[in-house]
Image: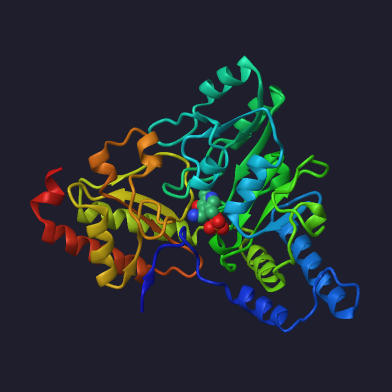
Amino acid sequence: MIAYLDHNATSPLRPEARAAMLAAMDETGNPSSPHGPGRAARATVERARRAVAAAFDMPSDAIVFTSGGTEANHLALRGLGAAATLVSAVEHDSVLAAAPAAERIPVDGDGVVDLAWLERRLAEGGVGLVSVMLANNETGVIEPLAEVVRLAHAAGALVHTDATQAAGRLPVSFADLDVEMMTVSAHKLGGPPGVGALLIQEGLPLRPLLRGGRQENGLRAGTENVPAIAGFAAAAAAAADGDDGRIAALRDRLEAGLRAAVPTVRIFAAGADRLPNTVSAAMPGVSAETQVMALDLAGVAVSAGSACSSGKVRASHVLDAMGVEAAVARAAIRISLGWNSTADDVDRCVAAWAALAARAGGRARAA
Ligand code: PMP
């Protein structure tokens, strides 16, 4: 059995999502067709839309289903044609790439956005959109969204938040956040990969990236992926309440184990407000690749920093923006728990990591 501790890369499919997908796969119709099978497929999509809206506490069901978080982020950042855009320096690559001209909001040593900088920049004027993630995929740090929204709205700017990693791990209320746009991706919360959504304020003058058919209220052309959308909704409903303390307790057990094994371990943003499931830690002197491979040989799956880019380990722009020295950043791994993680998974991870530290000897302890 593999101890799968890489939920921030992708989370295993929840049984509720699997069941909903299997049922939808036996439906034939195109949701745009007016006949019976088409209407049945349309009903499945609209039921899913209402379920996702309920899971994220939306007052409306103004949701654009997309092919995932990456597309939703592109729609948010390119669909308004807004004046100047500000994005945090620790955003996911899909946000940074969608808005290459955006100015970067700096972060402190924990990766939390610099609100004083933001306030000063907003006061200079001309900002149309601010995009700050709800929680970071590498460190789990939760950004002070309420403050970001207050400052942005006071300056007349709209707010987008990438909630891809927060959704399903924390209760997320679109209404309370008071943002204009929010990105969610199904596969991070136990739904299938390749489907996600942009949640929007009703009436937002968004323009589509993909044109053709009039699907998704004219905001996303292309026949809907009905089974994936049904699976997404079932997973979002199952995950809506976030962690009830079980995963946070496993995370604490994991961090205590890492500290006991290597007293010099660096746990990033340990003192900041963080997701209950994410640990970003460095074993000084031992490369992330070596750690990931050693854990893999022991049947434990974790990632080196951000694993989203085709198996390549690159320097992390998140740790860099936090001011972490390059040598320490190269030794950083990410361990992320989720809905099916167990104490046994955690203990196997700690044991394998401790064994590697013992083999690495002075190298691991000296740094
Ligand atoms: N935003 C964040 C914060 C993410 O972690 C990811 C996935 N790594 C994405 C966006 C992209 O989502 P998707 O894989 O669904 O395109």
Q: Residue at x 57, y 20 (%)?
A: 121
Image position, residue 7 (x, y; %): 46, 62
Q: Nearer the viewer, residue 294 or 168?
A: 294
Q: Nearer the viewer, residue 176 or 41?
A: 41
Q: Quadrant of the N terminus?
A: bottom left
Asked if residue 270 can be seen in this view, the reply is no
Q: Quadrant of the C terminus?
A: top left
Q: Nearer the viewer, residue 187 or 177?
A: 187
Query: Residue at the left extreme?
Result: 362
Image position, residue 31 (x, y; %): 81, 70
Image position, residue 88 (x, y; %): 51, 34
Q: Residue at x 47, y 35 (%)?
A: 89
Q: Nearer the viewer, residue 226 or 177?
A: 226
Is 249 situated above or below 160? below
Query: Residue at the front extreme?
Result: 212
Chosen colour scheme: rainbow
- Quarter of the figure with residue 21: bottom right
> Is 42 on the left-hand or right-hand side of 148?
right
Is 318 situated above or below 14? above
Image position, residue 333 (x, y; %): 32, 53
Is 21 situated above or below 153? below
Query: Residue at the bottom extreme?
Result: 26
Asked if residue 300 can be seen in this view, the reply is yes
Q: Residue at x 62, y 46 (%)?
A: 74
> Is 121 on the left-hand or right-hand side of 210?
left
Q: Residue at x 61, y 15 (%)?
A: 124
Q: How many marks?
A: 0
